[in-house]
Structures are given as C-alpha cells and as structure tokens.
C-alpha cells in the first residue's frame, strides 16, 4: 500500500530506488502519508522514537556507523525544531542525515492553526541543502512532478556526496490517511550523484614540506580505515615529522604521540621550553580538534603555515590556513617525496613524551579514588573489539590521557561538542553496529538525555558507564571562584540524583560502586550480563577531581 497523496509517493519511491532504507519516525499525524508509505513497504526498516531530540541523535548514531544516509521523519510544528541539535552535530561532524518534515500547506502558515510554524529554511545556517516540495493533487501536474523529482534528487545527492544533513519540507493537506494499492505516477527518475571533489596537490605545498625541518601532523576525528600502517610508517620514517593523534582518530602507532595534553600541559606556560615544539608547518587530518591546549599553543606562537588534508571540512583553526588538499589522506601520504630533512624534531618530542608516561606511573600509585582513577581503571579493563562511544566534556578529555585499545572503534559527538544527545547517539550507533557497544558518560550528560532510554531497539548487550560526581565537574577545572552558592548552582549544578529509578523504569540492569574494591567486584558482572542492557554507575567525590588532574600536569614537569 502507498499513501494516496502523490508527492508522498514520490518521496517513498525515490528513497527506495536510491536504497535509503533506515527511517527513524517520530509519531505524529501530519506526517501520516509518509509514515504509511515507509512502514507498509518491507524494503524499509522503520523505528519509532517518540522524543524528537532523541530520535535525531539516534539517526545520527546509525548514520555514523553505517556511513550512509539515515532519514528522520516528523510531524509539523515544534517537532522539527527538536531535531536541530542533531542537525548541527551532523553538519559539523559531516554525517549524512535526511530530515523529512511534514508541514501545513503554504496558505495555512501564520493564520492561527495549531502545530504550525515557519518551517521552510528553518535550519538555514546548519544545512547543506534544503527545499520544499510542491503539493501534487493530480498526475497531470507534470511540471510540478518533475520539479519535485529534481529537488529530491538534489537533496539525496548532496547528503551522499558531501556527507552532511539535508532538509526536505513537505506540505500535506487533509485527508492524510487514505491509501492506494498502486502508485498514481508511473515512476520516479533518479539523477546522477554529484562527483566527488578532488584537487591537485599544489607545488607550493611540496616546497614547504621538503624544506621544513619541523612538521607537525594532527590527527583528530577519523574513521578506522583512513590511514594504513604503511602510511604511518612512511610518515614517521621522516625525522622531521611529529604526529599527534586524538582519541577519536582511531590511529595507534609506536611513533605517534597519543596524549597531546600530557605532552604540552606541563610546559605550556614555560615559553623557553614549549617554543621548541613550534613547527615550520602544520597538517591537520580529520574533524574538530578536542585538545584546547594544542589549539591555544599554535595560536599563541603563530603557526607559520597550515594545510588541511582530506574531504572533511577545513577550518582556519590556527589563523594560518594556506590550503585545503581535497584528496584521501592515504593518497596524500603516497604522493610525498622520499627525501627527508636532517632533524631531531620527532626524536626529541617522542623521547619527552615517553619520559612523561614513565614518570606518571608513580603519580598513579598514590592517586586516591577520583574521576582520574576511574578512567584509568576503565581504559585498562575494557574488553577487546568493542564499539566505544564517549560522552562530551570530562569524558572525552580524560580519554585523551590514556592509550586506546587498538581493537576498539571510538566515536564521540565532537561536531558541536554538546552534552545533549550523547546517549541517544551511542544507542543509535549500537543499533547499527555488529560490535557490542559500551558508552562512557558523565552524570549531567546522562540525565540530560535520559529519554534516550525510551527506546525499544536498544541491543541487549549495550552497556552504559556513568561517572557520577554529583555535578558538572569539568567546571571545577576551569578558572574561576569555586565552592560558592553561585558556582554550585549555576556552573557545577550540584545534584543528588542516581540512575537507579531510570533503570527500573526502562528495565535496564543496574550496578553501583563507590570505591575501587567495589568496582573490581561489580565490573566483570556488569560486562558479562547480556540478557538486557546494563548500566554501571560509578560514584566519585565532587571536590577533589580538579586538584588531582591539575596536580598531575604539575607533577610531570
């Protein structure tokens, strides 16, 4: 069965022809024609997620893992505004997401009807492409049918070729629920996908590269197959090349600095020491950079020249962007000349980093129960071959301080870096992955997105670890007055909530620990139970975490 409304038929038929099969639906009435079309065709896999803000991030997580577009479908009014956090994350993280919003007919906007807002171009600042379909009342509207085909194809081509969100606004007039057995239109046409952007590597780049005695490469958010071991071996065989990787780069190599802050923080305010790190040129590969310290450092000492390599969007992060080389990073590596420059740049900083890692062992031995110790225990004891999803704020920043397991696939919402939607994204990723998924998050982020658990599709082996320090502990690390009423209420947001009632409501296994001995007993049980989703709540002190972390960096000097 198909919806009776012709332009709804166009959407369903073209999505099927273009092999877009995953549809996350937020229940409503105005979107009934499309809900009918998608749910009554076995080609599509449909999911019902009531809370639109959660639904948006679930679709985001699925698209993140599938590396193909996932569609969102909602009713009119405020519903599509609740998708906006996920849309912005998809925009900055470059994840293909299609928003289908049902709407009132144009002549019924701003006349006082309920669930009616100005939906056209609502995401205009954070969308790759948006359009509004023409209402089709009869198949003799040939020009309107052709216009809709062109708009739909352009939207799908854009999200596929450029990896980001697109928005298709679709006005419907009642009746909304009528069905027909066969399509009213004969067929829908597909238009070729946009060609991938390519660019020739400029000679100017090779001049800088060949003549620079200190080259810094920063690897941020990447998929697991962007650079091979051979690529890394070639880059690190050049003594003038120092590579720094972030936790989301999914890159591990013996000659790569995996702990940027551990290297920089101890000397960030000692100009005579940190200036030795100053590179002749910087190359970035991947998405947004997590480490504020490397960004602040390269801005403070005025990076000489910066190139960005790869299809991902180039940002002038250090105010010296010379060019965007839009080729695959592996192709770029293969193009580099075998000539190397006499330099001790890599050797010096790798030795410095290894000394820091060796020295910190004695700090860990005396560290009391705190956030830092919990993250150390977690990253030492996570099982192999998992999909690891990280929450924002403290979680991803603590993760940057530890070497990651080479068998893990690691992701976090680092586009807008917000705490909203982290749990929903992790659940969506788990739904689309063939690996067991573990999600590590902080308490505020978890409670903020608690409706993520209102989801009938959570895999039984999905696991959540909540580090509960009774507030936004990251704010204690930042400069400012602490332990005042204003700070506790408006910055740290003190609370006494636990996750036990949420777990009871959503039938999730619950475990709670508050010290190292309890952690050792509960952790393996938490990992081994796979009959339903599990949550491990780790309670830590609220007032010592900032001092322990800041003292760690001082200790390494």
Image (cartoon, rainbow, N blue to C red):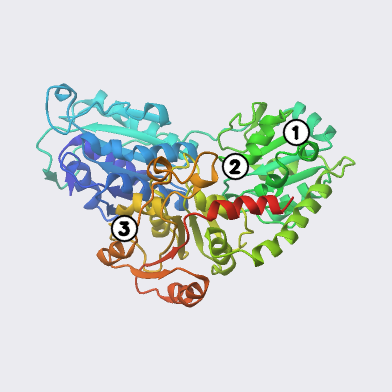
Q: Disc 1 designates what residue?
A: 281
The image quadrant that residue 30 belongs to is top left
For the residues marked 1 and 3, what is the alpha-carbon distance in whole angstroms? 46 Å
For the residues marked 2 and 1, what is the alpha-carbon distance in whole angstroms? 17 Å
Note whether 515 is above or below 455 in the view shown: below
Circle 1 SS class: strand
Residue in view at x 9 percent, y 37 percent: 175
**Comparing labels 2 and 3, the label whose residue is closer to the camera:** 3
Instruction: Compare residues 494 and 402 and report the one nearer the observer.
Output: 494
Could you classify mark 2 by the number of other residues whose Cα lies within 10 Å: few (under 14), some (14-19), or many (20 or more)?
A: many
Q: Which mark is residue 453?
A: 3
Residue 44 can be seen, yes or no: no
Mark closest to the chain's N terminus, 2 or 1: 1
Residue 395 position in % (x across, y down): 51, 53
Instruction: Compare residues 238 and 490 and report the one nearer the observer.
Output: 490
Note whether 163 is above or below 208 in the view shown: below
The image quadrant that residue 135 belongs to is top left
Q: Are marks 2 and 1 in contact (CB under 8 Å)?
A: no
For the residues marked 2 and 3, what is the alpha-carbon distance in whole angstroms? 31 Å
Mark closest to the chain's N terminus, 2 or 3: 2
Q: Residue furthest right?
A: 342
Mark closest to the chain's N terminus, 1 or 3: 1
Could you classify mark 3 by the number of other residues whose Cα lies within 10 Å: few (under 14), some (14-19), or many (20 or more)?
A: many
Q: Are marks 2 and 3 in contact (CB under 8 Å)?
A: no
Circle 2 SS class: loop
**Comparing labels 2 and 1, the label whose residue is closer to the camera:** 1
Position of 284 with respect to 171 (left or right) is right
Q: Residue furthest front?
A: 484
Note whether 216 is above or below 384 in the view shown: above
Q: Disc 2 designates what residue?
A: 286
Residue in view at x 15 percent, y 42 percent: 29
């Amino acid at each position: 069965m198909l919806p009776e409304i012709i332009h709804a038929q166009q959407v369903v038929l073209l999505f099927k022809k273009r092999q877009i099969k995953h549809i996350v639906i937020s229940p409503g009435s105005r979107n009934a024609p499309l809900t009918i079309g998608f749910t009554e065709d076995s080609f599509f896999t449909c999911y019902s997620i009531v809370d639109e803000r959660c639904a948006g991030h679930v679709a985001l997580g699925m698209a993140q893992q599938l590396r193909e577009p996932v569609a969102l479908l909602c009713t009119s009014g405020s519903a599509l505004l609740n998708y906006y956090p996920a849309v912005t994350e998809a925009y900055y993280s470059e994840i293909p997401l299609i928003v289908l919003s049902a709407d009132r007919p144009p002549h019924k906007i701003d006349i006082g009807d309920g669930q009616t807002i100005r939906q056209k171009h609502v995401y205009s600042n954070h969308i790759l492409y948006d359009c509004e379909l023409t209402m089709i009342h009869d198949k003799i509207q040939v020009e309107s049918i052709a216009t809709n085909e062109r708009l739909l194809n352009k939207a799908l081509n854009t999200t596929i070729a450029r990896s980001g969100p697109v928005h298709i606004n679709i006005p419907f007039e009642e009746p909304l629920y009528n069905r027909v057995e066969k399509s009213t239109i004969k067929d829908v046409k597909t238009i070729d996908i946009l060609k991938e952007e390519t660019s020739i590597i400029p000679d100017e780049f090779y001049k800088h590269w060949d003549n620079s005695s200190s080259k810094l490469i920063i690897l941020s958010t990447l998929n697991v197959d962007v650079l091979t071991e051979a690529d890394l071996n070639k880059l690190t065989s050049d003594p003038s090349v120092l590579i720094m990787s972030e936790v989301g780069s999914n890159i591990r190599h013996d000659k790569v600095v995996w702990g940027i802050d551990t290297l920089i923080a101890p000397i960030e305010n000692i100009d005579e020491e940190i200036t030795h790190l100053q590179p002749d040129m910087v190359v970035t590969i991947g998405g947004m950079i997590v480490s504020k310290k490397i960004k602040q450092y390269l801005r403070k000492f005025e990076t000489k020249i910066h190139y960005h390599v790869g299809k991902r969007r180039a940002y002038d992060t250090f105010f010296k962007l010379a060019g965007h080389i839009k080729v695959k990073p592996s192709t770029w590596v293969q193009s580099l000349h075998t000539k190397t420059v006499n330099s001790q740049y890599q050797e010096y900083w790798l030795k410095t980093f290894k000394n820091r890692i060796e020295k910190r062992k004695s700090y860990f031995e005396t560290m009391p129960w705190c956030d830092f110790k919990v993250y150390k225990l977690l990253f030492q004891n996570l099982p192999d071959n998992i999909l690891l999803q990280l929450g924002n704020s403290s979680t991803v920043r603590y993760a940057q301080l530890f070497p990651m397991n080479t068998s893990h696939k690691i992701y976090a919402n680092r586009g807008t870096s917000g705490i909203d939607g982290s749990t929903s994204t992790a659940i969506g990723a788990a739904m689309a992955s063939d690996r067991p998924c573990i999600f590590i998050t902080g308490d505020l982020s978890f409670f903020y997105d608690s409706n993520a658990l209102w989801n009938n599709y959570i895999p039984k082996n999905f696991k959540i670890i909540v580090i509960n320090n009774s507030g936004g502990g990251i704010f204690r690390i930042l400069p400012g007055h602490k332990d005042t009423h204003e700070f506790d209420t408006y910055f740290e947001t003190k609370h006494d909530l636990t996750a036990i009632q949420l777990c009871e409501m959503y039938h999730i296994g619950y475990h709670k620990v508050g010290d190292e001995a309890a952690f050792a007993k509960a952790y393996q049980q938490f990992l081994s139970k796979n009959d339903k989703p599990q949550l491990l709540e780790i309670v830590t002190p609220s007032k010592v975490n900032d001092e322990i972390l800041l003292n760690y960096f001082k200790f390494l000097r």
